[in-house]
Image (cartoon, coloured by chain):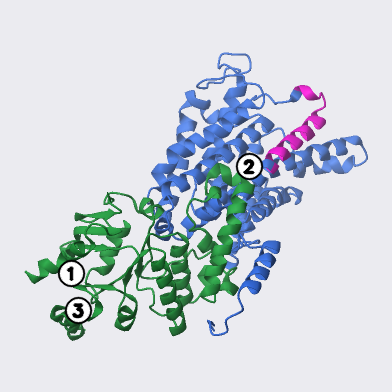
Chain colours: A green, B blue
Amino acid sequence: MTETMVAHGGSRQGGGAGALAVRDIVVTYGGLRAVDGVSMSFDAGVITALIGPNGAGKSSLLKVIAGAQRPAKGAVVFHGDDITRQSADRRARSGLIWTFQMARVFARLSVLDNLLAAEPDQVGDHLFSAVFARKRWKRQERETRERALSLLSGFGLYEKADTAAGLLSGGQRRIVEYLRAVMARPRVLLLDEPTVGLAPWVTEVLVDDLARLCNDGVAVVLVAHEMELVARVSRTVIAMANGRVVAHGDFATVAANAQVKDAYLGNVGGA
Amino acid sequence: MRPFLSRSPHPRKRQERPFLDSCLNGSTLRHEMSFYISTLCVYFVIYALGALSLNFQFGVGGIVNFAFIIFEAIGAYVAAITSLGSPHGALAFGQRFLWGASWPFPLPLVAAGAAGGLLALVIGPATMRKMRRDYQAAATLAIALIANQVISNATGLFNGAAGLAGVPAPMSNLTASFTAYHWIYVVWAAILGLVGYVVMTRLSKSPFGRTVRAIRDDEDAAVAIGKNLLRTRLCVFVIGGVVAGVTGGLLVEFIGAWGPSAWGYAESFVILQAVILGGVGNERGALIGAFLVGIVLSEGPRLIPAIGYPGLIDSLEWIVIGGIYLIVLWFRPQGLLPERPALSLTGRARRDADESATSSSAPDHDRSWA
C-alpha cells in the first residue's frame, strides 16, 4: 500500500504542471522487468535526483524518457504532449537532452566542434544553406562559438578547444559530453552519473553550473550514487529499487526511509 | 575504368616506344604528347571527383560503399543513351538499349547526375537503416556484383556485355582539330572539377558536414543531440551518388564508349584506395590520392619498358595497387593528409577568440586538469 502511494507521489507533487512526467512505465529485458510500473514527474527549475542501487532501473528509465528504449507499457509526457512514440532525435530537438552513463564524444571532432554540433536550429546544418548561405551561417556560428568557448573556459577546457575529443581523459570527456548537452539548450536535462571520475574541483564547477541551469528554468534529472552530492544539490530525491519507486521526497525523508536503507544494504550484502 | 580503356583508341605508350624513339624530332611527338597529357588531365578530374565523392560518403560520413562504381556506371549509361538518340536512329548503329534521346549539351550530364542521385535514393535506405558497417560493406558489394551481372546479361537495357559505343562528343562543333578539342574538354572537365571541389569542401566544413562527422563518430550521441540519422546519411549518400553519376557522364562523353567491363566491382576499391591513401575525411587528401592512384599508379607502368610476357605489367599494376592499399592501412591508416579535428577554429578566428577570452576572464589557475 505504502509503495503504491509513494509510486504515484511524483504526479501528486507535480500536479501535471511538471515539465516531464512518466506514467506506469514498464521495461522488460527478456523475462526481467527492469522498470516495473514507475510514475513520476520532474519540475522545471528543480534538480531531481534519481538514486538507487545498481540494477534499480534508473538508467533504463532515463533511456525510456530519452527515447532510446521503447517501454513495454506506459507513457512519457513532455510539456503536456504524449511523446511515448516520438523518435529520440525529435525529443532532443524539442529540448529533452540525455547524457550517457559512459561518456560518449565525437572522437574525431575537436572539443569545440563537439559543442558546436549540439547547437539547435543551425542555419548551416541544412544542405543548401551550408553551401549557398555561408554568410548567414557564419554569422550564427560566431555567436555559437562564443557561447561554446565561454562554457569550455568555465571548466578549464579552453586550451583543449582544438584537440580531438577522442584524445581527452575520461573526466574531460564527461565534461565535454555535459557541455554538449548544455549547448543543445535543454528544457529537461537527464544526466546519468555525470560526476563519476571527476576531480573534486570539477564537480564543484558542475554543481554551480547545474544551479545556473535550474535558475534558467531547466528541469534537471540527476542519476547519482554519491549521496553527499545528492544531499547538496537536489531539492527532490526519488529512490528506486528493483524497478520500482520506493521513496520520494526531500533527501532527509528519503534517506530515513526503511525501504531505501534495505535496498542499499541488500545491495551491499549481495556484493 | 581501366580494363576498358586498354581497348580504347588511346595509344599504349609502352608498345609504341620504338616508333616514338625513332622519330623524336617531329610534330607527331608533340601531337602525341598533347593528346596524352590532355587525356591524363581529364582522367585526373574524373578520379578526383570520384575520390571527393567517395570521401564525402566514407571519409566524412562513415558510410561504407563498395558499390561506388555503379553510381558512376549509371551516370555513364544515362549520359550515353541521352546522347545516342533513339535506339532505331542512325547513331545507335544497331545497339540495343532501353530508350534513347539526343539531348543537347550539357543535359546528358545533368541526367547522369540525376540518375546517380536517384539510384542512391533507392539503394540508400536499404543499406543504411541501422546496419552495421561490416554488413553495409557486404550489402553494397553484393549490389555491385548483381548490378554488373544484370547489365551484362539483360542485353535490352544497355546493350549487354558489349556495352554502348559511338557516344557523340559534346561541343565537337567548336573546333575541327582533335587535339584542340581534347584541350577544350580538359577545360570543361576542370570547371566541373573545381565546382565539385568547392561544393564538397564547403559542405564538409559547414555545420552540416560537422553533423555528418558527428554521426560517423557516434550515432547514438548524435541522436541524443537531435540529429536525424537516416535523413542526414541519405543526403550524404545521394550527394555522393550525384557526383559519381556526373563523373560517369563526363567519362563516357570523353571516351565515347561504356560497358560492363569498365565498371567491375574492383574499380570501387581503386577509388577507395585514393581516398585512404590521400587521407580519409580530407578533401585535399582526396585530390592527392586521386593523382597518385589514378595517374601515377595507372600511368607509371606504361613508362616501364615491357618485361616478361605481354600483359605482365598490367597484372602487376593491380598487385601494386592492392599492395599499397595494405601498406597504407597498416602503417598510415589516416592517409597522407589526415583529417583535421578543428573545423571551426583556425587562423584569425582563433586569435580573435583568444583575445576576447583573455580580456574577458583572467585565467583561473585552480582549474587545472593536469
Residue at x-position 38% and y-position 65%? A99
Estimate the spatial distance between the alpha carbons at disc 3 and disc 2, rounded to whole Å.
Answer: 77 Å
Q: Nearer the viewer, residue B208 or B176?
A: B208
Q: Percent position (x, y) of residue B358?
A: 65, 74
Q: CA distance from mark 1 to mark 3?
A: 14 Å
Q: Which quarter of the rendered picture does the C terminus of chain B lie within?
A: bottom right
Could you tell me which secondary element the residue under label 1 belongs to?
A: strand
Seen at 52% across and 26% down, the residue is: B158
Q: Amino acid at mark 2?
A: Arg
Nearer to us: label 1 or label 3:
3
Chain letter for mark 2, please. B
Q: Is residue B190 magenta?
A: yes
Residues at marks 3 and 2, common chain?
no
Which of the two discs, 3 and 2, sits closer to the camera? 3
Q: Amino acid at mark 1?
A: Val
Q: What is the chain identity of the residue bearing mark 3?
A: A
Work out whether residue A61 can be spotted.
Answer: yes
Q: What is the quadrant of the N terminus of chain B in the image?
A: top right
Residue at numbered disc 2: B2
Image coordinates of residue A57 in percent, x first then y, are 23, 68
Residue type, mark 3 in image: Thr
Q: Are marks 2 and 1 on the same chain?
A: no
Q: Closer to the camera, B303 or A185?
A: A185
Mark 2 lies on a secondary structure that is helix
Side (left or right) of A203 relative to B32: left
User: Dot 1 corresponds to which residue?
Assistant: A245
Q: Which residue is mark 3?
A: A253
Alpha-carbon span between mark 2 and mark 1: 67 Å
Q: Position of residue B198 (x, y in %)?
A: 67, 46
Few, some or many residues within 10 Å of mark 2 (<14, 14–19, 20+): some
